[in-house]
C-alpha cells in the first residue's frame, strides 16, 4: 500500500488523517469504490483530493455547489 503520510504533509500540511479518511483513501487507492458520509468539515474532500494526486488517471469531481467548487480550486492552487 502507498505511504500517504508524506503526500498528506507535502500537499495539505497535515500530519494525520481524520477518523474514517484512511479507510476511504486506501479503498480508492486499491481500486475499489468508496462512499464517505461524513458531516460538514470532516474531510470528505481530502478523500478524493489525495488519491487524485497519487493515481495516474484523471479524477472527475461532480459538485452541486459553485461556492464549494471555487473554494476547493482555490485551496488546491
Image (cartoon, rainbow, N blue to C red):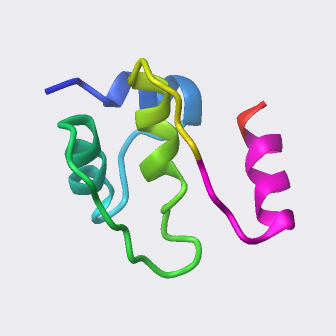
Q: Position of residue 75 (x, y in %)?
A: 75, 42
Q: Which residues are magenta?
A: 61-75
Q: Main SS type for the magenta part?
A: helix
The quadrant holding residue 5 is top left
Placement of the C terminus among the 4 image quadrants: top right
Q: 9 or 74, which is in the foreground?
A: 74
The quadrant holding residue 15 is top left
Residue at the bottom extreme? Answer: 39
Placement of the N terminus among the 4 image quadrants: top left
Q: Is residue 15 above or below residue 68?
A: above
Q: Position of residue 36 (x, y in %)?
A: 37, 68
Residue at the left extreme? Answer: 1
Give yes or no for residue 62 being in the magenta stretch: yes
Q: 34 or 50, which is in the foreground?
A: 34
Residue at image point 68% right, 63% down = 63
Residue at image point 39% right, 24% down = 55
Asked whether, in this view, residue 44 is left or right of residue 67, the answer is left
Q: Position of residue 21 (x, y in %)?
A: 33, 57
Q: 55 or 58, which is in the foreground?
A: 58
Q: Is residue 75 above or below residue 58?
A: below
Give yes or no for residue 71 being in the magenta stretch: yes
Q: Position of residue 31 (x, y in %)?
A: 21, 38
Residue at the top extreme? Answer: 56
Q: Is residue 23 above or below residue 56?
A: below
Residue at image point 28% right, 64% down = 20
Asked whether, in this view, residue 54 is left or right of residue 3, the answer is right
Amino acid at each position: 500500500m502507498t505511504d500517504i503520510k508524506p503526500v498528506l504533509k507535502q500537499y495539505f500540511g497535515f500530519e494525520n488523517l481524520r477518523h474514517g479518511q484512511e479507510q476511504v483513501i486506501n479503498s480508492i487507492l486499491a481500486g475499489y469504490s468508496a462512499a464517505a458520509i461524513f458531516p460538514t468539515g470532516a474531510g470528505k474532500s481530502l478523500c478524493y483530493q489525495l488519491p487524485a494526486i497519487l493515481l495516474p488517471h484523471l479524477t472527475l469531481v461532480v459538485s452541486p455547489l459553485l461556492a464549494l467548487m471555487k473554494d476547493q480550486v482555490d485551496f488546491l492552487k
